[in-house]
Image: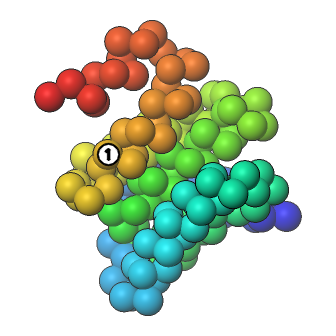
Amino acid sequence: YQLDHTKTLLAGLSDETLLNYPAMSISSKIMAMELFSKQFINYTFTGDCNAMPIIPLKMVQTSLTYGMSPLSGVGFALFGNYLALAKGEVEEGYRYVKIALSLMKRMPSIAHDSEIMYYSAHTRIRVEPIQSANEHYIV
């Protein structure tokens, strides 16, 4: 259900529309994005594979409802990975990974850019040559 709901929210939204979304301004929603990001790491460590996809889906849903935050890029990168690597929807997943990287450039955050680069590389390595996936790591 959560995946279908997220795809419905994204249906018909162009990359440019997503990149020009207003900024998230409600502090409780910004905090929720922080908590989602941290919870994803907890699920990774505990191996809760059934719960893991819920986090990126909720991050994308929250971003679409309340605006983009610096952590929205993390949500889109994780969502793209889920689509490309778990569901086999490589093209669609890759689109959201590229949106994540574009959001990172539009809303830079020293605290979260490395997460976006790290998670984006998972799908980029599958789609692009290894050199391009590493370009964000080279200083």
Q: Is residue 68 visible?
A: yes
109 horizontally vs 55: left or right: left
Q: Residue at horizontal 40%, vertical 79%?
A: 30
Indicate whether 68 appears above or below 130. Answer: below
Residue 132: percent from left, percent from top: 36, 17
Residue 85: percent from left, percent from top: 69, 32
Residue 80: percent from left, percent from top: 59, 42
Residue 66: percent from left, percent from top: 47, 78
| Quarter-of-image position of residue 70 | bottom left
Q: Residue furthest right?
A: 1
> Which residue does the numbered mark 1 point to in the structure image?
114
Residue type at numbered disc 1: Ser
Category of crowding for the residue at label 1, using alpha-carbon neighbours closer than 10 angstroms: few (below 14), some (14–19), many (at least 20): some
Q: Residue at horizontal 63%, vertical 68%?
A: 58
Q: Residue at horizontal 54%, vertical 36%?
A: 95
Who is closer to the viewer here, 101 or 47? 47
75 horizontally vs 44: left or right: left
25 horizontally vs 88: left or right: left
- In the picture, the quarter occupied by the C terminus is top left
Under tag 1, what secondary structure?
helix
- In the picture, the quarter occupied by the N terminus is bottom right
Q: Residue furthest front?
A: 46
Q: Is residue 64 visible?
A: no
| Quarter-of-image position of residue 4 | bottom right
Who is closer to the viewer here, 110 or 23? 110
- Number of disc labels: 1
